[in-house]
Image (cartoon, rainbow, N blue to C red):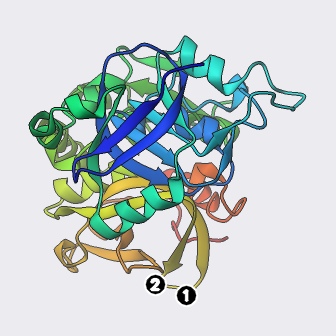
Amino acid sequence: MAEPVFLVLSNGSVFKGKPFGALGASDIVGEVVFTTGMTGYLETLTDSSYHGQIVVQTFPLIGNYGVIPSDFESSRPHPAGYVVREFCEMPSNFRSEGDLDSFLRENGIVGISGIDTRSLTRIIRESGTMNGIITSNPDSADMAALNSFCIHDAVAKVSTREAISYEPESAKHLVILWDFGAKENIGRSLLERGCRVIRVPHDFSAERIMSYKPDGIMLSNGPGDPADNAGIIEELRALMSYRTPTLGICLGHQLLALAMGGATTKLKYGHRGANQPVRDEKTGRVSITTQNHGYAVVLDSVNPRTAEVRYVNANDGTCEGVDYKNIPAFTVQFHPEAAAGPRDTSFLFDRFMRLMDGKAAEDAA
């Protein structure tokens, strides 16, 4: 029988559980966050926006449909650790190619099961996101090191190392996907609409991006504090001077806001899951969205002379999207490629297509 493992939070709370996934690893430190999705654990694990975090699944049973590589959002899992109430040891799905325990073990991801995830989630909701450590000996946890832990160079660690081209059967537009940790379904959504996609690294300059003569720019999602990316923000400011149609998603939304003079702030516990209601301030329509972020654009920092807040979170009123007036660009904090509704916000890709066509970019959902 495996020895117990513990999750120790920076506030001193200790949770005892059973190990699964990678065993015998050294103490794992990360930012502890929770996600509320009832399904989509494979997309969660392979979403690079979770880089450096210990992810808690609030749904009590995880892994019941196994491991399906075609559903991955990247080539590998990214969390520092994984916490569940119970994992399924015998998945049943005709598409499954393995089980969750083996998948985590093969990729070196430490997991804990048997934890009261409801109690753990309540602590994070009430006290806010905090650091934690997965360890076999809670008495030896270095609380000073735990409290000082910070995720550094997150985007650089998950971005592609070289430019990659994706070709549709018939290309209508060339889109540069600026990769800050892009989910695969963003590229697939563009390919489905006849776009040739060139995925470029995070450290490309504006001049190098424009050397491809793109019809559009896609600013991807990604991990970490958006304000840490000073170089990208500077290049993004330069890139906007070319007035190329642009769509930003998640981190891309935050980075463009910073480049245009806005500000970002860290949320108490973030928005992570497939059930976030977002209201369109122009039409009053509410969509159910998938989200994964711990930071938000400050509403009052959006300059009304050059931009307008188009979407807000119906739960807490935070900024969920911006339409820009002085450049052909719009951004959203949520994931239109994730099909949470299941197709509530996929029309935003069609809006981007119309923008590249030189037509009015109004939504025709």
Give the CA separation, mark 1 to mark 2.
5 Å
Q: What kind of element bears circle 1?
A: loop
Going 53% across and 52% down the picture, which residue do you hit?
116
Q: Position of residue 219 (x, y in %)?
A: 38, 43
The amino acid on which the numbered mark 2 sits, given as a three-letter code, is: Glu
Question: Is 7 placed left or right of 276 in the picture?
Answer: left
Query: Of 152 and 280, which appears nearest the observer?
Result: 152
The disc at residue 281 is: 2
Q: Position of residue 2 (x, y in %)?
A: 55, 20
Q: Residue furthest right?
A: 94
Q: Position of residue 279 (x, y in %)?
A: 51, 79
Residue 150 in sight here: yes
Going 18% across and 59% down the picture, which residue do you hit?
260
Residue that badge 1 annotates: 284
Residue 216 in sight here: no
Going 44% across and 28% down the picture, which residue do you hit?
78
The disc at residue 213 is: none
